[in-house]
Amino acid sequence: MNAEFLLRSLAARPQAEAQDAVKFLFQNAYGCGHLLPEASACAESIGKEIALSHTADAEPAFEPLGSGLCRLNLRAPLVRALPPERIARMMRVTAEQFQPSPVRFTDNLSVLLALAGRYGTDAPPAATFLSLPFTAAELDAAAGRHAASGGLPRHSERYREAYRPAYRVVLRRYAEALPLLAALERRLADTGRATLALDGDCASGKTTLVALLEPLYDCNVFHMDDFFLPYALRTPERLLEPGGNVHYERFRREVLDSLPSGKPFTYGAFSCKTGETRSVAVTPRPVSLIEGSYALHPTFDGAYRRLDAVKALLTVSPAEQRDRILARNGEAMLRRFQNEWIPLEIQYFQAYHKTREDRLILSGHQSAEDL
């Protein structure tokens, strides 16, 4: 059970009752799919709730639920910077990607019942390091009422009165990317266009994050993997240059110089596997998402200024990076990453992004307990 997240929630809300814990466990196991009406109705409901709630600068923007989910706080300024339609789309993507688990709900409830028996309000006095604001009997009764009703658990009246909950359940990665999303929304509001350039360590989650952002916007996605240096250009001199293993001249010429015009264009996507380049046609859209290692090469700075691009770096610890590459690519490819590509990335970051100033820094780490 993701007990840590629930215990933190209860510690922060001493007025919570047993049914509030049941609701937490239900959301952890079932996500938000049960709350999804038609798209416009979902956005309308979010907009009304935001309008009826007050801004709370001191409250966190999200509360982890475990299972890769969170409660997105509709009172937080960063969340209120997003249009309701964007939050509704987050919920839609969350429902598509999250697999509900009745077994997880039942198992977690059993664990919590055991904890309540030991550390609830009727626990022996010796059990002082952990306490729950309800008894095992109260939790068992709340779970029974939920099972009998067959409906969705609700917050208790005491909880609602004390904390005025206003949130939506979404993937935690969306909440962790809120600074990035808010910056994109400002560009869209100001000019009707926005560009994101997302760089970072290999295996830090760049492609995964952009795949989550893509369904939120009317956008084009550009992958730096399509612009690695062709074999004929990989001279020793070029590869000694920080960031020299990306064909930055071609990316700047074919993509970045074409975006400001708002006109259709084509670019060549190079395949490292085949050595061939295929032509890709682009129809301009309001949002452009650029992701991959070397996306913030300094030769792009002028183009990014013209585009008023949002620039972000994703980071990951070396240990987590190794584990992800091993799981994703296997032992042989891990050795290639360690011997070839990671040293080149380190050289590039040391040369151009050592201070990592003037751009958003996002962590690509997600703890195992939240998976």
Image (cartoon, rainbow, N blue to C red):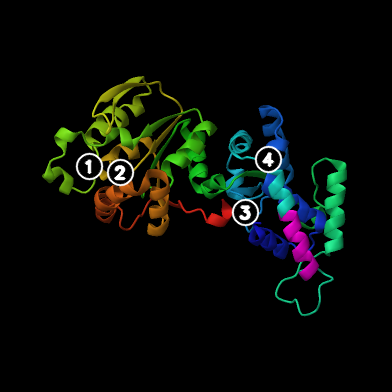
Label 2: how many residues lie within 10 Å, few (<14), some (14-19) or many (20+)? many
| Residue bearing mark 4 | 32
Residue at the spot 60% in from the left edge and 37% down from the top edge: 83
The CA span between labels 3 and 1 is 39 Å
**Residue 311 vertical placement versus 315 (above, below):** above
Q: Amino acid at mark 4?
A: Cys
**Residue 57 visible in the picture:** yes
| Residue 342: % across, % down | 29, 51
Q: Are marks 3 and 1 in contact (CB under 8 Å)?
A: no
| Residue bearing mark 1 | 245
Q: Earlier in the sequence, mark 4 or mark 2?
A: 4
110 magenta-colored: yes
| Residue bearing mark 3 | 64
Give SS at disc 4: loop
Label 3: how many residues lie within 10 Å, few (<14), some (14-19) or many (20+)? many
Q: Amino acid at mark 2?
A: Tyr
| Span colored in magenta | 108-118
Q: Are marks 2 and 1 in contact (CB under 8 Å)?
A: yes
Q: Earlier in the sequence, mark 4 or mark 1?
A: 4
356 magenta-colored: no
The CA span between labels 2 and 1 is 9 Å
Give SS at disc 1: loop
Looking at the rendering, which quadrant does residue 131 occupy? bottom right
Residue at the spot 52% in from the left edge and 43% down from the top edge: 182
Residue at the spot 22% in from the left edge and 42% down from the top edge: 245
Q: Are marks 4 and 1 in contact (CB under 8 Å)?
A: no
The CA span between labels 3 and 2 is 32 Å
| In-front residue for pair 223/180 | 223
